[in-house]
Amino acid sequence: MTERILRINMTTLSGAFEEVPAEWQGIGGRALTSAVVAKEVPPTCHPLGKHNKLVFAPGLLAGSPAAQSGRLSAGAKSPLTGTIKESNAGGTAAQNLAKLRIKALIIEGMPGEDKFYGIQINKDGVTIREEAELIGKGNYEAIKTLMGRIGEKVGVLIIGPVGEMRMSAANISVRDPDGNIRCHGRGGLGAVMGSKKVKYVTIDDSGGPGVEVKDPEKFKNAARAFAKAILEHPVSGEGLPSFGTNVLVNVLNEAGGLPTKNFRYGQFEGHNKISGETMRDTIIKRGGKPKHGCHAGCIIQCSQVYCDEEGEYVTSGFEYETIWGFGANCCIDDLDIIAQADHIMDDIGIDSIESAVIMGVAMEAGIIPFGDGAGALKLLEEIREGTPLGRILGNGAASVGRAYGLTRVPVVKGQGIPAYDPRSVKGIGITYATSTQGADHTMGYAVATNILKVGGFIDPLKNEGQVELSRNLQIATAAIDSTGLCLFVAFPALDIPETMTAIIDMLNAKYGLSLTGDDVIALGKRVLKTEHAFNLAAGFTSADDRLPEFFNEDPCPPHNVTWTFTGEEIDEFWNF
């Protein structure tokens, strides 16, 4: 069986398999979601209207024995930014789809009636049924109910109440191997799924054809070399497995780039109380899991399971960006409060990064004071209930800023700026400004070279070299996102040459190709240019590739630096 496209029309409540067009045969993941959106979605359409489409695509290596290959891309026109959007997540769905040889799942149209539906996919095809029982339910309860109905091993893509209410910060949750939650977080794709009246998609690969590998022996050798490089690198093999992504709290605080009190300062007095080191000690003391994979085949294991004082599960995938945002950015130094917030956000289906920026702006507005952890939890419940205030909050940080007449609103193209102050880590500032998808650190993770000294070192406080650094990283990231590999393979890829060789060898062995490094770079460039062209057609210009004014005007202690790039310097990014 060859790979196929599964197209689901919610207007007719029908699904059909299609052959993969020639132009899409050599791409997957982000490259494919962006190609479909660019070809089939009118750039000026309303993101929550009938002309938008929601696309899921496993990466090129999904379902294979390659380590770190379980990421799934989701794409659409974003209701948060108005730009093209791709978000990728772990969990099991990418591998489930790949084992059914579904190259992409495209959901289009809208039902005529105000009813929600569930979509079930298996080896025999697709079934679309009205769903009433789970509407309004949180993700934890809904996933548990689905497991009881369908089985323990199916993949699940689902929206919570925030997606049902079509709020612009809604995410799409993905069931992980333990039945917990990973998220397509950024860009409000949960609202797009809600607009299609799809509560959930389940994927059962039982009896499916599985994944074909053209040259198994060559693939095995390349996969072994790839895994070896990951485990030998100090970041992917030691730092992330030991302390998770939250290892960065103390690192960024020391560097003066930890955004504090809605981006007023670069250091937080309470950093030790919320650090990765403290989190690890707390997890071990309470009988949680300090290491945990977000998908089958993960060998980095930067996730974890965080428990309360009684040893009861609270959350997993407790990431640096969430802890930074509810911690330093909101001046809350209690990991248990932040973990409760993470649990609520997973349950209601809202992006934890956008929510962290939302809370900082809400505190700026005086809705609750800085440091009010209990107040932050109450505001999340306002979002769950869909109160008037909850809807202002649930539509993103920019929405809160507009409603309260604020200027200190850290967003680019309407999306909240995460986790790293662009004045003190200037390479990531270029990524925030130029990303095709609004402020997003994962688009080109310049922190690696600016702070962690991976792939060399470029002084984070100086302008020199930052545009080129961000450009090169964004091109490489677009290519990695298309393979379905975890972004963290970039750490060994930047320092250990054999890593990229192994990735290319795996692709060639799986598909019977003869790709070179130049082909991979060309793919990354093509993805960025496709996304940029969509945004230009949607009405965006170079004037949108800018940071908020306060970064130019307010020095960031302790280095007391400002954002000093000119528009002309930023615009050089697109000269490739």
Image (cartoon, helix red, strand yellow):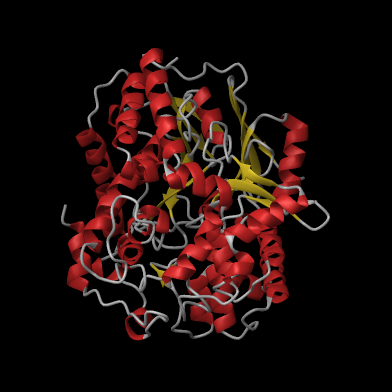
Residue 528 visible to an observer of this rendering = yes
Residue at x 56% of width, y 52% of height = 190
Residue at x 49% of width, y 39% of height = 72
Q: Is residue 235 left or right of residue 115?
A: left
Q: Is residue 476 left or right of residue 205?
A: left
Residue 361, by quadrant, is bottom right
Q: Is residue 391 left or right of residue 55?
A: right
Q: Is residue 506 left or right of residue 357?
A: left
Q: Count the marks: how many?
A: 0
Image location of residue 497, percent across then percent down: 29, 36
Image location of residue 477, percent across then percent down: 34, 46
The one nearer the camera, 443 or 193, is 443
The one nearer the camera, 413 or 214, is 214
Residue 12, by quadrant, is top right
Give the vertical position of 540 relative to 311 (above or below): below
The one nearer the camera, 273 or 211, is 273
Residue 18, by quadrant, is top left
Give the vertical position of 452 relative to 198 (above or below): below
Residue at x 53% of width, y 81% of height = 403
Image location of residue 462, percent across then percent down: 26, 71
Quadrant location, the N terminus: top left
Residue 350 visible to an observer of this rendering = no
Image location of residue 381, percent across then percent down: 71, 67
Give the vertical position of 447 relative to 230 (above or below): below
